[in-house]
Image (spheres, grey):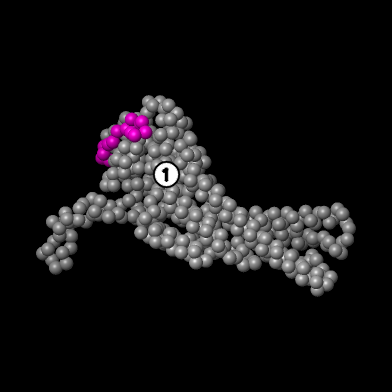
């Protein structure tokens, strides 16, 4: 798998060097890399799903460690593991159903019992128990008593039966990989269209002559607001500039260019302006299992201002941003310190050095965190590509997209 290994290594380097920006781009590239890895992975004849899960976990741990703060990577790795488990269980259930139907058919016909033996109750029970876990078809057949096996009438018959079993194993391997790859393709498609699906709900939440406040720059928020504008909604947008990177400036220019009445305010003016606002609509870096939000720095201040003035605080987030982890000390573990140069020019530090000591240690320190944590009690509503949900409903969504067994994927910064 030299080409796939090269692709994985190239993606790892991009993650380590922070050359991929945005959760959507990161999630999509992660899914594409895992799809290529799965398509080229050779699986054994037995326990194909277990082997594939272990291989994906190994690659996933490397990807997560490359940029632990980008939670979308771990989300997609766990989603793919969940897909593998579901597809394996589906194939096993279908195989059990086929065996049961075969047994019923033999009972009804009662013809050539020696050549077409009936499955015993023990065999059917063993097969039924196996559906409660995700085994391979080989494990299922090994649980059946020897009396249910088709007798070998000759050596040539045994050879043909062996070839048939080998063909069945290869078919199941191809079927498992095919189904998993198809499901990953659907996942990639969902990630690509999440903005459009979220934007379709804008007209239900933004009404005439409202004032909307947002912070930073988010493509999801941009498309959401512009979709409401296209539906002939007339409203104003206050954009907090989002220092020190001032991403709000770029958002304000784009909104104004697309015909929205836009006003830029400083971050410190949020509390002063919040009384004029009808709704706060923001994007998110990640949504945690408890309904808390990892968002651009300054977002917690906006959420507190909204709560103080009883203004709805709405978070837009694609399903790929739903993280099944709980935020243990999120201000430290789920944050990232950016370069001090965003706050002060390098030359300005020379005046702050203590040259009286030999080390020249600085008297001025710069802390530039990238993210804020917004607790779930400050969030009024989540709008995802599957609809609007309360923070208390997040656990139900997580149960649909992740398996409990997949949460063991290592994440050093959360340990």
Task: Count neighbours of disc 1 (C-alpha within 10 A) and say few if under 14, some if 14 to 19, many if 20 or more.
Answer: some
Residue 98 position within the rendered picture, expressed as x and y whole percent measured from the top left: 74, 55
Q: Is residue 259 magenta?
A: yes
Residue 242 position within the rendered picture, expressed as x and y whole percent measured from the top left: 30, 43
Residue ID at (40%, 39%): 221
Residue ID at (31%, 55%): 337
- The answer to whether residue 254 shows anywhere in this view is yes
Residue ID at (38%, 42%): 218
Vertical position of residue 15 compared to residue 397: above or below: below
Magenta segment range?
256-269
Residue ID at (28%, 52%): 368
Kindly indicate the quadrant of the structure image that contains residue 127: bottom right
Q: Quadrant of the C terminus?
A: bottom left
Q: Does the magenta stretch include residue 132?
A: no
User: Residue beneath label 1, please?
Assistant: 376
Residue 44 position within the rendered picture, expressed as x and y whole percent measured from the top left: 62, 67
């Amino acid at each position: 798998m030299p080409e796939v290994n090269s692709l994985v290594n190239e993606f790892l380097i991009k993650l380590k060097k922070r050359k991929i920006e945005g959760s959507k781009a990161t999630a999509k590239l992660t899914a594409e890399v895992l799809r290529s890895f799965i398509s080229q992975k050779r699986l054994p004849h037995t326990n194909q799903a277990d082997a594939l899960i272990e291989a994906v976990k190994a690659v996933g741990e490397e990807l997560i460690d490359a940029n632990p703060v980008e939670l979308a990577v771990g989300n997609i790795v766990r989603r793919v593991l969940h897909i593998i488990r579901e597809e394996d269980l589906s194939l096993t259930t279908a195989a059990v159903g086929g065996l049961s139907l075969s047994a019923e058919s033999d009972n009804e016909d009662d013809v050539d019992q020696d050549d077409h033996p009936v499955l015993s109750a023990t065999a059917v029970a063993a097969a039924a128990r196996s559906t409660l876990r995700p085994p391979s078809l080989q494990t299922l057949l090994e649980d059946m008593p020897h009396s249910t096996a088709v007798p070998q009438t000759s050596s040539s018959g045994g050879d043909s039966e062996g070839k048939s079993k080998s063909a069945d194993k290869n078919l199941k391997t191809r079927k498992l990989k095919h189904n998993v790859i198809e499901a990953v393709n659907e996942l990639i498609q969902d990630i690509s269209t999440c903005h459009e699906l979220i934007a379709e709900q804008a007209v239900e939440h933004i009404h005439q002559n409202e004032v909307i406040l947002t912070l930073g720059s988010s493509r999801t928020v941009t498309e959401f607001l512009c979709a409401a504008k296209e539906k002939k909604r007339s409203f104003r947008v206050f954009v907090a500039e989002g220092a020190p990177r001032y991403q709000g400036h770029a958002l304000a220019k784009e909104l104004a260019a697309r015909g929205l009445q836009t006003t830029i305010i400083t971050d410190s003016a949020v509390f002063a302006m919040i009384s004029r606002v009808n709704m706060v609509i923001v994007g998110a870096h990640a949504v945690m299992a408890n309904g808390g939000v990892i968002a651009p720095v300054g977002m917690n201040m906006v959420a507190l201002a909204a709560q103080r003035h009883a203004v709805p605080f709405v978070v837009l987030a694609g399903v790929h941003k739903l993280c099944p982890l709980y935020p243990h000390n999120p201000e430290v573990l789920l944050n990232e310190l950016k370069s001090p140069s965003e706050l002060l020019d390098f030359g300005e530090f020379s005046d702050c050095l203590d040259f009286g000591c030999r080390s020249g240690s600085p008297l001025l320190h710069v802390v530039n965190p990238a993210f804020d944590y917004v607790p779930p009690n400050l969030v009024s509503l989540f709008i995802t590509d599957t609809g609007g949900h309360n923070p208390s409903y997040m656990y139900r969504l997580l149960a649909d997209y992740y398996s409990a067994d997949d949460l063991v994927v290592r994440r050093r910064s959360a340990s």
